[in-house]
Structure formats: C-alpha cells, structure tokens
Amino acid sequence: MIRRSTVLLAMASIIGLGACDRSEPTYMLGTLERDRIELKVESSEPIIAIQARDGQAVAAGDPVLEQDPERASARLTQQMALRKQAAARLAELERGPREESIREARARLEASTAQTENARVNLERTREVFAQGLSSDSRLDFEETNYKTAVAAEKANREALDRLLNGTTVEELQQAAAALEAAGAAVQQAQLDLDRTRIQAPVAGIIDKVLFRLGERPPPGTTIAVLLDSSRIFARVYVPEYLRAHIVPGTSIEVRVDGVDKAFTGRVRWVSSDASFTPYFALTEHDRSRLSYLAEIDIPDAADLPSGIPLQADFPAE
C-alpha cells in the first residue's frame, strides 16, 4: 500500500507540473527594424565626392556619392555625334538626289558614250589593217580591250544616272530610320551611364553606413552604402508555436521597447508559414527547444526610434 501510494503521489505531482506547464507566456521577443537598401555602383570610376555621412537622414533624391563622370561624359558626346550623323543621312535619303548630282551623272554618261564610240571606230580600223596583214596581234588585242572597257564604263554611268532618277528605295529609307533609332538608344544608354555615376537616395531614410572613401575605385556591382528606409518601421519578432494560430495579418498587438515607457500599437503585416528555430536572443528557459515563426509588425509611431533595439510584443489576452 505504501509503495502504491508513493507511485500515485508521484504521478499526481507530474500531472500537476504538466498542468502548470500549460501556462504559456503571451509575449514575443524581437527587434525594431527598417528595410535595408543597398546602394550599388555600375562602374569602376574613382569616387570624387561623398555627400552623405553615416547616420545622416536623407530625402528621396538626395546625393549620396559621386564617381568621376569624365569617361561617361565623353561616351555620351560620341553617341550624340553618331545620332546627328544618322539623322543627316536619313534626311538626305528622304530629300532624294540633288539636281546638280543628276546633271553631273548625265555628263559622265555622255563622256563615256563618246569614249565608247571612239573605241569602236578604232577597233574597226585596227581590224581592217590587221586583215591586210599590216598590224600585229597585240595591237588588235589592245583595241578590243579598250572597246570593252569603254562599254563597261558607259554601262556603269548609265546605271548611276538611273539610280539618281529613280530616287531612294523604301529599303534604304528603312535602314536609315533603323540606324537613327539605334543611335538614339545608344545616346539614352550613355546618358543613363552618366547619371548613374551620381548615386542618389531612392527613398527617404537614414544612411546606415558608407563603405568607401574618396579616391577608391569600387568594382561594378559593389555595395557602396546602406540606406535604412524610413517609410516603414516594423518589429521583427518570433512567434512561438502555441501562438501561431492566433497571429494573423491584421492582428493588433501592443509593442514595448526597451528604454521607452509608453507602449506602441502595432499591426501584424506578415507571418511566415515556415517554422524555424527560436533565435538565441529570444530564448528563455521555458521555450529553448520550441519552434517559432518569423513575423513582422508595422509600428508607424516608432519613427524616432533607432533600428536594432530589442522589444517585446504582447499578444492580447483573451
């Protein structure tokens, strides 16, 4: 009987401990955060100016850093000249040949026609002399060659005149228009490359860190500064497994920040559907081995608080 009573008492104590263990806390631990925006460069030009410092508040469009624009500016000038050349060529084709060019082509055709006639007469005389045995084979070959050359030149000049009289073809106009469009796109690209030597803040926020100094050449694609977006301040918290079913987007939650007496009202914006292990800074003796779900709680009234400070989100008691 004593042994059985002892076992029953032990089981009762275990059940009692389990019942006490059901009193789970209704708070979530985390930190105050802002979205981090990495500002990158697209060229390896040296840095010639830094307009923002660490911790400085900037508005959208404020200058942060500037690279040497000489190379990009020269490329822009070159592309603008090529665009002018393409535009002039298109205008020339649209206007058609000038009257002076047509008269010149006709004069060349008349001259080549006269040369052909002269070469024909010389060839006939040489053939008559050759038939009488008074001329050599080389002389006859020379005159035949001259005649064929004159005929070919006359044909070429006639084709050139016909081309001027017929005007520009549709295909030539299309090619010139396409060349002008390509030149315009090259100018836009060169202008964009020049503009991006001046790094600006894309949104209002706080410069967290400038990572380079004057004179340095950051490789293309390198992050040169980190900007904390001030448009949305939120708490990043870890929701314990036993509260996950109650924390949904739109839930209103009270948030307390270390060092601040008043509590902030936040609203859940997002909760991860994938569980993860509770991070080290959110561990307590009670829930070391439990899983948690990452969540973000918007806190619009916490704009004056710095990022990274610890906080506690209290789930409303039912």
Image: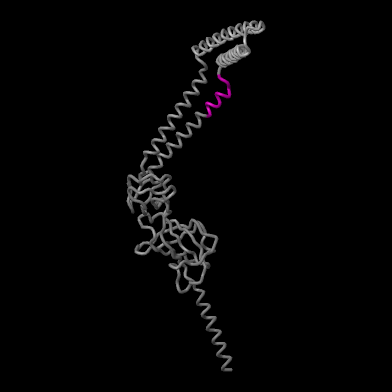
Q: Position of residue 316 (x, y in %)?
A: 47, 64
Can residue 166 be seen from the camera position used here?
A: no
- In the image as oriented, which residue stretches furthest toward the bottom? 1
13 shown above or below 298: below
Report the span colored magenta: 168-178
209 shown above or below 195: below
- 200 relative position to 121: left or right: left
Q: Position of residue 84 (x, y in %)?
A: 44, 27
Q: Quadrant of residue 284?
A: bottom left
- 36 relative position to 293: left or right: left
Of residues 297 and 94, the one nearer the viewer is: 94
Of residues 59 and 43, the one nearer the viewer is: 43
Examine the residues drawn in magenta and state their main secondary structure.
helix
Q: Quadrant of residue 301?
A: bottom left
- Say which residue appears at 47% left-offset and 73% top-offset: 286
Q: Which colour style is shown? A: one colour
Residue 23 lies within the magenta run: no
The N terminus - image quarter: bottom right
- In the image as oriented, which residue stretches furthest toward the front? 133
Residue 173 lies within the magenta run: yes
21 shown above or below 139: below
Of residues 110 and 193, the one nearer the viewer is: 110
How many labels, in total? 0
Q: Position of residue 44 (x, y in %)?
A: 40, 46
Q: Position of residue 250 (x, y in %)?
A: 50, 56
Can residue 84 be seen from the camera position used here?
A: yes
- Say which residue appears at 43% left-offset and 29% top-offset: 81
